[in-house]
Image (cartoon, rainbow, N blue to C red):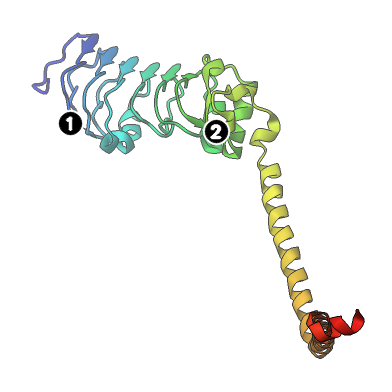
Amino acid sequence: MNNGTELEMTALSLSYNGIKAIEPYAFLGLPRLHMLDMSHNQLESISARAFHGLLELRSLYLNHSILPPATEQLSHALSTLRNLHRLELAGNMLKAIPLLDMYNLHALVLINNSIESIGGRDVTILYQQRRIRIYLSLNPFRCNCELEAFYYWLKNSSQCPDAGRLLCSEPEAKRGVPVEKLREEDVDCMNENLEAVSYVFLGIVLALIGVVFLMVLYLNRRGIKRWLNNIREACRDQMEVYHYRYEQDSDPRLANVAV
């Protein structure tokens, strides 16, 4: 493809080919290519210029193809595809949405990855790219306050067609609960922070009470010692009385006198 001739090919499927790397300018000479399918490969390396020259590419399929070493390289490689309309990245164990700056993108498929949370920065990008439709089902969402921005985006936006199938995987109490069915307090960072602060405050108060108690004991140590000595003497006197009575009752001579 690099011999200077341009092919009129508009669709190319390279799925199930065991491809491990996409070299720079790998598709140079295919300027008319509209669809590229590289699903079900084993990509360990993707050059930042891997898709250079694909000016008219509309659909790119990379489902079940990207291995962890190539994950961070993905966004740089995709940044050259300004006219891409559909991008499928299902089943790639991605932990975050690729940072894409493609305002022409209409569909982003991220089904069955490892995305646990979507932060405020990603939500801002989604708000800016209003024409995009993003598919996120079968991801293990951690439903805590880190999901707050995404939760409200999901409630107020129609950009996620499979929103009803987004389920919580953590915490255990919310496992299987649809993300959009959560209560506002479930993702309220303010309440969570206040609860943490209240526990810290309670700990400080208890510590102060303990310090005051120890100080009172220290300042009254002589009186406490005298009080303990008095109790000990009273107990000793009482025990001597019981001991005397026991000796009286156990002496047989005293028993005969009594008869």
* Residue matched to label 1: 23
Q: Amino acid at mark 1?
A: Glu
Tell me if label 2 and label 1 are in contact, CB under 8 Å.
Answer: no
Q: Nearer the viewer, residue 129 or 219?
A: 219
| Residue 247 shows up from this direction | no
| Residue 146 shows up from this direction | yes
User: In the shown orientation, is residue 152 left or right of residue 27?
Assistant: right
Q: Quadrant of the N terminus?
A: top left
Marks 2 and 1 sit apart, C-alpha to C-alpha, by: 44 Å
* Residue matched to label 2: 172
Quadrant in which residue 174 is drawn: top right
What SS does tag 1 mark? loop
Q: Nearer the viewer, residue 99 or 201?
A: 201
- Residue 143: x and y in percent read 57, 33
The circle on residue 178 is none
What SS does tag 2 mark? helix
Q: Residues within 10 Å of mark 1 (few under 14, many from 20)?
A: some
User: In the shown orientation, is residue 85 left or right of residue 226?
Assistant: left
Residue at 41 percent across and 19 percent down: it is: 109
